[in-house]
Image: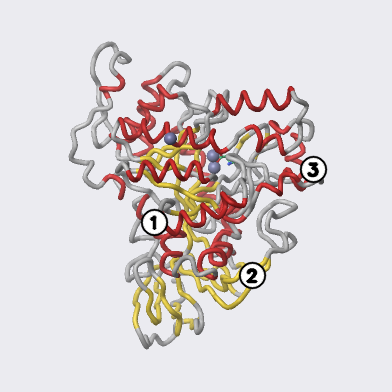
Amino acid sequence: KQEDILIRGGVVVNADMQFKSDVLIKNGKIAQVGLNILSPGARILNATGMYVMPGGIDPHVHFELPFMGTVSKDDFLSGTQAAVAGGTTFVMDFAIPLGREISPLEAFEQYKKLGEAKSVCDFGLHVAITKLNQDGDREKIVRDMAEVVKRGVNSFKFFMAYKGTLQIEDHDLIRAFALARELGAISMVHAENGDLVQEGQRKLLRQGIHGPEGHSFSRPPEVEAEAVHRASVIANQVGAPLYVVHVMSQAAMEEIARAKAKGYRIVGEAIAAGLTLNETAVFDRDWNRAARYVMSPPIRSIDDQHALVNGLKTRTLDLVGTDHCTFDTEQKRLGVDDFTKIPNGVNGIEERMTALFDRLVHTGKLTPSDYVRVTSTEAAQIFNIYPQKGVIAVGSDADVILLDPSKKKVVYHTEHHINIDYNVYDHWSFWGSVETTISNGRIVWNNGTLYTEQGTGRFVPTPAFGKMFHGLESETFHSSDYFAGHSNGKKKGVNRNGSY
Ligand code: URP
Ligand code: ZN
Ligand code: ZN
Ligand code: ZN
């Protein structure tokens, strides 16, 4: 049996309100919220002067991702240890079926197993669909999508870039969005025009530009914005909700604003890197340093960065992840002669909560409640695990952080918990330090020390039909309309429970 924990004297912050309150935790759940709670025998945490907040939810991470000729460095162990050290208690990873041999269902099972064996906090999974035919078998992918929904996935990810490996073409996107919608799953897109990116890369290499700066030049904001626009139109045409991951430019954000103004069901995700870093970093004379900032879509200008921060304030952007995807210096050097071969990705999982507190709350742009909304509650609602996660309320999972707003967190790559030899935030300091992290009622981070146990994190199923589907469930809709002509002339739909 776990020890009871009594958090005393703090200010509880939920997305809808904040109030002075104690919080009692028993058996992994929040047992009581109120003033002057008495609980003899409980371990007391003094939260005077601190915010008591729902643990962060990072909706976008990649652990041990096989990508661009190598495998990303952080796995579910180092990745979730860094997460809890930074105040994040729930992560959503992407099961990506890379290679022809592995199906979406196999990818899901593989990542679920990795996560269950290694994670120190709870996790959920998105499943990427990279094409609609595996070995020419479209029906198999359709069956797999229905099956993973049954097993606890309510989100499918589609890459409109990475031509030749992950990219899915528009005609498949139309059908896949339609099918996801019928299954009650949200469609997520990596929005960049992959064909334009490929042309841009060829042109720059021909001009003799081989360094990391070529990465930025080859995929300008318009290339991102065009894909956001196209995806939003396609999703709206088939009546599917859409989630745009890692919005990095003002131009892309404006496409989301436009779609929202038209009444489309669309969600915009910012990432920590886009809100804090700017493109000057990739122009560093030191190749090793510049390459650290290579990710897609690229890190943009200071003006874009400010626009994205303001987008969170105006709710054009809804929530914040990291896209944490790490490669060490040696791996980055795979692209030393050719920027198109630099493995794409930056770190952020350990810094997201403090960096955002500094940039959003300490600057006065967002209230503490809005901060909780964009770092936790919104993700729980979109992925349909609210109020199990994303709120401090009786009966919710005891995923809780104590954040000291008057203390600075200084980042040192020599002290971080991720598995690479640098940190894009090395020597940065942020107002708002996560002093304590509680995951499922266990203290896993306290005063600078980890108390984690490998494999204690659970896979949390995300059920179909979340927030973005309100009112959609009742509409009649058949993905078979979009698959007509592909099933021996017979119209086959997939019904709500995923059978045929
Ligand atoms: O550069 C990035 N973003 N790497 C991770 C894979 C992806 O596109 O999200
Ligand atoms: Zn992406
Ligand atoms: Zn447009
Ligand atoms: Zn990503």
Q: Is residue 195 above or below residue 462?
A: above
Q: Which three-letter amino acid code belongs to the residue tagged 1? A: Glu
Q: Which residue is drawn at 46% across and 54% down?
A: 311
Instruction: Give the mark nearer the N terminus: 2 vs 3.
Output: 3
Residue 53 appears in which quarter of the rendering? bottom left
Secondary structure at numbered mark 2? strand
| Residue contact between numbered discs 1 and 2, judged by CB atoms under 8 Å | no
Mark 1 or 3: in front is: 3
* Residue located beneath label 1 in the image: 378
Secondary structure at numbered mark 3? helix
Q: In which quarter of the image is the C terminus?
A: top left
Tell me the crowding category of disc 1: few under 14, some 14 to 19, or many 20 or more residues within 10 angstroms, Cα based. many
Residue 197 pos. (x, y %): 59, 28
Mark 2 or 3: in front is: 3
Q: In this view, does 368 lie above or below 56?
A: below
Left/right of residue 246 with respect to residue 298 in the rendered view: left
Q: Which three-letter amino acid code belongs to the residue tagged 2? A: Lys
* Residue located beneath label 2 in the image: 409
Q: Which residue lies furthest to the top in this view?
A: 488
**How many numbered markers are drawn?**
3
The Cα atoms of the two marked residues, 2 and 3, are separated by 28 Å
